[in-house]
Amino acid sequence: MYAMKHSSITLVISPLVSLMDDQVHGLPKFLRATRLHSGMTKDQRENVMIEIQKGNVDILLVSPEALTSWAGMSPYYSPLAKLPPISFVCVDECHCLSEWSHSFRPSYLRVCKVLKDQLGIKCLVGLTATSTRSTCISVAKQLGITDFREGMILNMSLPRNLSLSISKDKYKDEALEMLLSGDRFRNLDSVIIYCTRRDEVVRVSSYLRTRLQREPAPFE
């Protein structure tokens, strides 16, 4: 509502291209959203900027790498200089500010500095569903939140349609195979299995394809 009245946009920092695409397609039609990422052609990116400058965009999703690289450009070339006023910023999956910034996504270390020092952002929220309390405190410090009681909203309850269980198995592949072959999962049309590394995705997919005689599709 604020954006519609004051000709401004909301900026969403999102870590994955596939997540950006899903979020844009899943929003209600009255929220005019778009994204800018490396998977788009030059013409597509230019068309997005034209729509933004026309005032036809309420929400823009970008990656941390895009944001920090724009901040290092000359104002004449930087897309940041062509954006309307930014009324609000959301850092989605904000646990990445702490967990990824020191390893393979160093751009996350600069996100908050760019938002506050270069863009002058005053209104900012970080959202995550997969963060420990210590990670929350680390993220809060990066966002400049000093009063953790007032600055963090914690809710550990799960929706009724979700359940959470944890097992520690010595032979993980065999345990996964037994789980998928059991009554709970074997008749499902699809199941998502998360792995920590790309090579593990390929290995697990190959193992299940051989053992279950199905066609698991690796997705990165």
Image (spheres, rainbow, N blue to C red):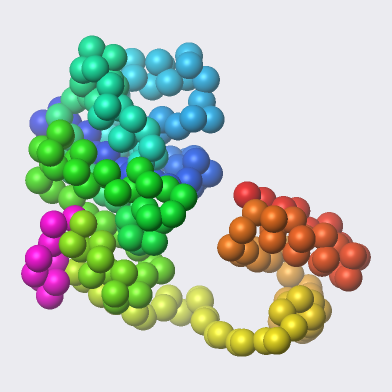
Q: Is residue 205 above or below residue 16?
A: below
Name the residue rendered at 52%, 82% in the picture. 164
Specify whether residue 145 is painted magenta. Answer: yes
Give residue 107's position: percent from left, percent from top. 35, 43
Left or right: 137, with 210 as reference point: left
Q: In the image shown, does 196 or 1 lie closer to the viewer?
A: 196
Location of the N terminus by quadrant is top left
* Number of numbered discs overlaid on the protein picture: 0
Task: In the rendered view, tell whether residue 180 sits above or below residue 109.
Answer: below
Q: Nearer the viewer, residue 18 or 144?
A: 144
Residue 21 horizontal/vertical position (percent): 49, 40
Residue that appears at 9% across and 46% down: 122
Q: Is residue 204 visible?
A: yes
Is 123 contained in the magenta span? no
Q: Does residue 81 sit above or below 58 in this rendering?
A: above
Q: Position of residue 63 (x, y in %)?
A: 39, 40
Residue found 13% across the figure and 48% down from its top: 123
Q: Residue 114's image quarter?
A: top left
Q: Which residues are magenta?
A: 143-151
Q: Quadrant of residue 119?
A: top left
Residue 174, x across and y down, in percent:
79, 80
Figure quadrant of residue 127: bottom left
Q: Is residue 171 left or right of residue 5?
A: right
Left or right position of 197 against 105: right
- Image position of 156 with respect to 6: above or below: below
Q: Residue at x 35, y 75 (%)?
A: 132
Can residue 53 be seen in the rendering of this structure? no
